[in-house]
Image (cartoon, helix red, strand yellow):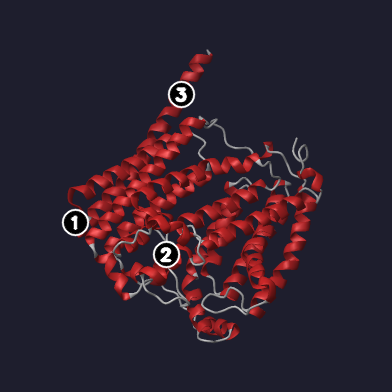
Amino acid sequence: MDQKIKASTDNMILPKIRISSMLITAAVFLLYASGYELTAAKLAAGGAHYLLLNIVAAAATAITLLKLRDYDTPPPAWMVFFVLLVFGYIKFYWLILDPTFAQTFFTSTVKLFFLDPAGLFNAFLIQTISFVVYCSVLIGFSVISGKKHSGSEPNAAKEEELPCPAAARLFTSLVLFLMPLLMWLVYKYKIGILGMPSKPLPLHFSGVIFYFQIIVLPGLILAQICAASRSGCLRLARAGGGLLLLWAIADAVLRTSRASLLLAPLLILFLALSGGLRFRKIEISAVLGAGFMAVFFLPQITKYRMLRMSTVTSFDSLVYLFYNFSIAPHDVLSSVAFLLFRVPGIETMVLVLGFPAPVIGAGFLKVLFSTEGLSGYITNHLMGIPPGEPMGFASSFLGGAYLCGGILAVIIASVLVGLTATYGWNVLKAFRLEILPVARAFFLILLFWGITEGVSPILFKQAAAVAATVLVLEFIMRGGSVSRFLPGGGHK
């Protein structure tokens, strides 16, 4: 009887699996087939090889999606996978069809690189090599780990509840104290305002205030949301989401930062993926709404930055934008295109390949750990822009790896990214942190920055600030007792 029930159940499940497999295969085929069909004529330099690379990329995408759907693949691995897919292949097809958006970020000489079929094909080749290597690491990790889906939905109620109500209130108090203080300091000393120099403060206080504003304060808010959510204080958790949105708006106004508006919904999403927040309908609606509004207002923040750089005061700039506010469908499309091309991806590879002998070689470590890093090397050495100019060009991990050591370095970097995205997630769990979801949310954002903006001195500083923030949050969550950090303390 049990076998009949099991057989009947299997017959009910199998059609669903076949349908999902068909949908995945169809979506992948449509993406690459339409991309190839639309761009093949403009990339005739690749010939049959371009078709072959599209087939290989499509096969790698489909095999990875179909193979890993039965495994518990860590969220960072999927994040990197889709970032490479969107900012690699989708951006490449768009770049071929209309290079205008990419060209707006670069000087007149560099713009010609995006019209060179040979350089474009080589960038696509290296992108595909990297993508196939990364997908191979993901599949290998899943097979070795052997962690398959249990078939049931994750139940947050089964997780160990943290002693959160008191901690949530404490985090809320700290946020309400620090937020206005940091806003005032950033405004008074012009700290971190893009395109404008900061007022120097003794003992590197400008840097301290800057990282408190962009790392510590969001970390406190995430900890408050996590603590409140895990203890069932939904109102307090949702109030924390409001505080994070308020921080994003204030930071965008104070520092003319477009990234801050996008960072708020991204951090909430990463916290949910890390298990620190359960998404309900209202949370999903709020995150989608915040993300849409962030994209919607990108053109306004750009206009606001231009006004601020022309010495117009922030208040007068806001008043001007309010009375001259206008938005059109074309502006929304431009915002989406701006977001796609603002995040470094395959166009960095095209840029690097356009210069003669761009590979640094044996001296790459000296450049990588220099004050300006690979971004400075691209901006000042390759592009010839004088040091001190208020502009710089970041490199994705793909372009940065090629700069360091050519295709071999790209392969090694792809393996390292794959290992970081898979094993790094589990390493954090080994620390047995009370504040683990916040640490993992920060891990996701650092990894996102690393594969898009590239490894840089700023990333090292951000990682150090994140580590210090997580330690302080953990100390607070554990009640300030140092003994609980010692062997035998904490979780049993």
Vertical side of 325 occupied by 141: above or below: above
Q: Give the amino acid type for the residue marked by disc 3 in the picture.
A: Asp
Q: Quadrant for the C terminus, please.
A: top right
Mark 2 or 1, which is nearer the eye? Answer: 1
Q: Which residue is mark 3?
A: 10
The local secondary structure at tag 3 comes to: helix
- Dot label at residue 336: 2
Query: As drawn, is 31 to the left or to the right of 413?
Result: left
Label 1 or label 3, whichever comes before in sequence order: 3
Q: Is residue 104 left or right of residue 476?
A: left
C-alpha separation, residue under disc 1 versus residue under disc 3: 50 Å
Identify the image quadrant of residue 342: bottom left
Q: Residues within 10 Å of mark 2 (few under 14, many from 20)?
A: some
In this rendering, which labeled residue sits more in front, label 1 or label 3? 1
The local crowd at label 3, few if under 14, some if 14 to 19, many if 20 or more residues have their Cα within 10 Å, is: few
Q: Secondary structure at mark 2?
A: helix
**Residue 45 got which mark?**
1
Q: Earlier in the sequence, mark 2 or mark 1?
A: 1
Q: CA distance from mark 2 to mark 3?
A: 43 Å
- C-alpha separation, residue under disc 2 versus residue under disc 1: 29 Å
Tell me which residue sits at (41%, 34%) in the image: 67
